[in-house]
Image (cartoon, rainbow, N blue to C red):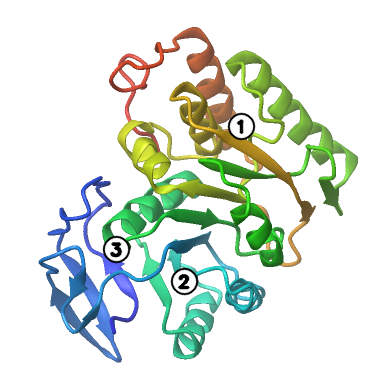
Amino acid sequence: MPGTRLSIEPPRCCLRATDIETRTLYQKGLSFVRESPTTASTWLGGTFSVGDIVGLLPILNEAGTIRQVIDGIFSTGSIDRLLVVDDGSVDGTLDQLDYARRQYPQLDVEVRHDQRGLGSGLLHGFCEAVKRFAFERLAVLGGDLSHDPATIPTLLATPYALVVGSRYTTGGRIENWGLPRRWISFAANLVARRLLRLKVQDITSGFRVYTKPLVETILANAACGGYEFQVETVWLASRQNYTIAEVPIAFVERRAGESKLATPEEAFKFARFVVTKAVYPRKPGTKGLRSPGARRSS
């Protein structure tokens, strides 16, 4: 079975599972071998897709927590296959992932060296999930233990197209955040919710479950590659009339490393997206929901 998969071209999101002729590089032990899958169901030498529920972990430098997260995910018995998208970690995370793959053959690892960012990592993971697996639902969470893997079955038990693990719905809570960060998060959600006329309380939550049709809709229409991608996916689901539900979760501040989200650049892109979509919305049912002249950002 293939080991770490390294993209040698920028990710190109394709909606058709049969369209997988992109050249790739695989690591098998200490040697690298090029492979070109010819169908959506088989790789050279092994099964290509298994399971109805796929997990997705976009990570960067999570050596202190990644093994515990992976153990927690598989211990739920809810995830058939797990895809980790690593943005070129340099803290020993890749070594931890190598050890984990020996224990869990259902774990796939994708390492990106040409791009970084939560939004682009999620887009890349969505694209790879569609190409690699015949799944029904995709569960997404973080690799820093802020999201408790034990909550995955609860989210999966909610039969909606988008299920958001919510800190702000009744029963949800945040642990170990200071007052300034609480206000920033609350204000960002409030502004986005009001301007975009969304009913979701926790628009920026990264703990979610998507159906495959919604994943494909996002790949066809998403234009964002930063943290604002979290808002864009909710906005797209709402505009396309997908069902959305929130499930209360306990969000715990990361135990190791630093948050990679609270930067001026990400704040600017977040505000730009919210204002742009509030001013230039497309009517539901129109082909494509990108604003005039919009391009997928990084």
Label 3's element? Answer: helix
| Circle 3: residue type | Arg
Mark positioned earlier in the residue sequence (3 or 2): 2
Which numbered mark, 1 or 2, is in the foreground of this view? Answer: 2
Residue at image mark 1: 267
Q: Position of residue 36 (x, y in %)?
A: 12, 69
Q: Position of residue 262 (x, y in %)?
A: 66, 42
Q: Is residue 228 above or below residue 261?
A: above
C-alpha separation, residue under disc 3 versus residue under disc 2: 13 Å
| Circle 1: residue type | Ala
Label number found at residue 46: none
Q: Which residue is depicted at the point 64% across and 62% down?
A: 153
Label 2's element? Answer: loop
Mark positioned earlier in the residue sequence (1 or 2): 2
Residue at the far right: name it.
Answer: 179
Residue at image mark 2: 80
Say whether residue 297 is left or right of residue 69: left
Q: Residues within 10 Å of mark 2 (few under 14, many from 20)?
A: some
Residue at image mark 3: 132
Q: Position of residue 259 (x, y in %)?
A: 67, 53
Q: Position of residue 182 (x, y in %)?
A: 82, 38
Q: Nearer the viewer, residue 107 or 209?
A: 209
Query: Which image quarter is the C terminus in?
Result: top left
Say whether residue 113 is left or right of residue 239: left
| Circle 2: residue type | Asp
